[in-house]
Amino acid sequence: MIGCFVTGTDTGVGKTLVSAGLLHALAPHHRHVVGMKPVAAGLVPWGEDWASEDAIALRSASTLAVAPELDNPVLLPDPLSPHIAAARAGVTIDIAAIVRSYNTLAAQADAVVVEGAGGFLVPLTDTLTGADLAQALGLPVVLVVGLRLGCLNHALLTAEAIRARGLTLIGWVANRMDPGMEAAGDNIAFLRARLGAPLLAEVPYQDLPDPRNMQLELPPAWM
């Protein structure tokens, strides 16, 4: 079973877009591919119920349909940092329970793409972060770099934090968020030389990005 954990240099840098793109890229090679959003904060209507926009996007890109408690075990109403949203909802985020949901999901799938919340060190509780969740899952990490001023520092710090947890940075994606960013190509070239992991895709700026059109170069072991 193939799995990866998708994190970002910040919130809103395109993790969901890239996670859905990975699912679409994996689907021709593996029959059962599924996305997982372990912790989501913020709700939108979904049929006769409520769901996370991120989880809905991942479900749309998956070839395997599963129960919501497996692909989004922690769903919080308020669009806030998870530790604050959880406290407001009277919920304690339990990493061990999330890992159990992941293991159940992985037993049904050929490939699982797990999308983290926010940046790598986003707080989940007063003492635990997204990095603790990634470490508990033990999956190789894909880093989404939102190309904007400051991204070099954010990318290098995140890569350092990933490796400090004993995890493998299997690749990264450059997402052009700012169409007016100067020297974007120079920033990408710098990160190619310094991140120590392959560039899986360079996503152009788009008003309405479509993950099905993403030109992703999957790691050979995933093919």
Image (spheres, grey):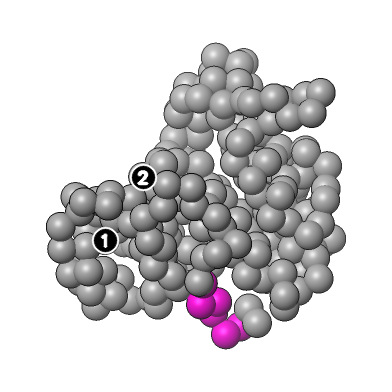
**Residue 65, x across and y down, in percent:** 82, 51
47 lies left or right of 81: right
Q: Which residue is mark 1?
A: 156
Toward the viewer: 78 or 159? Answer: 78
Query: Which three-letter amino acid code belongs to the residue tagged 2?
Result: Asp
Please check the rendered image and state whether residue 178 is part of the magenta-colored stretch, yes or no: no
**Residue 11, x across and y down, in percent:** 40, 41
Q: Which residue is mark 2?
A: 10
Query: What's the residue at 65%, 62% (across, down)?
Result: 23
Query: Which three-letter amino acid code belongs to the residue tagged 1?
Result: Leu
- The residue furthest bottom is 220
- Give the residues drawn in magenta, as a range: 216-221
Query: What's the residue at 69%, 55% (across, down)?
Result: 61
- The residue furthest left is 182
Q: Earlier in the sequence, mark 1 or mark 2?
A: 2
In the figure, 142 relative to 78: above or below? below
Residue 48 lies in quadrant:
top right
- Secondary element under disc 1, as helix, strand or loop, is helix
